[in-house]
Image (cartoon, helix red, strand yellow):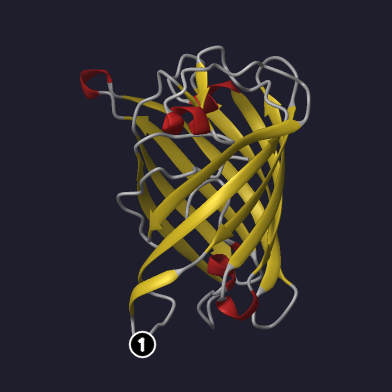
Amino acid sequence: MYKPNLLFTLLALPLFSLGQQLPADTLANKPAGKTWFVNTGLIYLSNLTYAGRRDSTSVPVLLPTVSLISSKGFFLSAIGYFDLNGSKSATEGISFTPGYVFSFDKQKQYGGVISATKYFITDNSPIILASFNATIDGQLHFNPDDIVKLTIAGSYRIGKQGPNDIINDAELSKEIWLYKNIKNPNNGFKIIPDVMLYAGTQSFAQADSASLVNTVLGTPTQPQVTRKYELLAFSGSMQFI
């Protein structure tokens, strides 16, 4: 699924740790007494990836975000996509994500998210999401005693052309607060290091796309488009929120 696997996040107002997937625990901590509220954010990605893969012609992107969230757990999010390619910078499109956040316990240490995303991105865009039509996503998270958070997710990806894909991932992450607002402990500044493992089919991979693992290791191999379910990638990131 598209959870912008951040190689580096420059700025993010409290909204989500990207990507198309909103963190269940963040949305679950809603201000008391409010039925609806709005979160906005601005995220910079040095390289937008999908399931550990990127288009070799991709450029840095800027993602303005806005979410309308209900106290019942329902939300509607929108993300804009702007490539930062110097004089060739352009608006690539937008995506919309309705969904629902739920929890199994009062402490919200166990829960998940279900959502669907519709993409409206130009066909000739340099970002890998250009081949996407829509995705249907679901995830479960486990964060006992706020030690380390484990997230298991699945996504059914519907392409504009060709066969569809199934993508699964497992993620380990940890919130580290650098500053907390005394009056509102949900506000402040934190970093979230995480590692992710991806598996699934990869017909979404373009002929010139590259594995993030191979990129890091300096191996110039190119992926083979396949319908076989297999291990796709392993990646790490650091989010600043």
Residue 116 seen in this snapshot:
yes
| Left or right relative to 147: residue 202 | right
Residue 16 seen in this snapshot:
no
Residue 72, image quadrant: bottom right
- Residue depicted at 72% across the width and 79% down the height: 105
- Residue depicted at 61% across the width and 26% down the height: 132
- Quadrant for the N terminus, please: top right
Q: In the rendered view, would you say 163 is above or below 180?
A: above
Count residues near mark 1 (Cα–Cα under 10 Å), then give few for <14, some for 14-19, many for 20+: few
Residue 227, image quadrant: top right
- Quadrant for the C terminus, please: bottom left
Q: In the rendered view, would you say 123 is above or below 110?
A: above
Q: Position of residue 185 (x, y in %)?
A: 42, 82
For badge 1, the amino acid type reads Lys
User: Residue lying farthest right?
Assistant: 228
| Left or right relative to 189: residue 126 | right
Q: Position of residue 120 (x, y in %)?
A: 54, 28
| Left or right relative to 115: residue 81 | left
Residue beneath label 1, please? 183
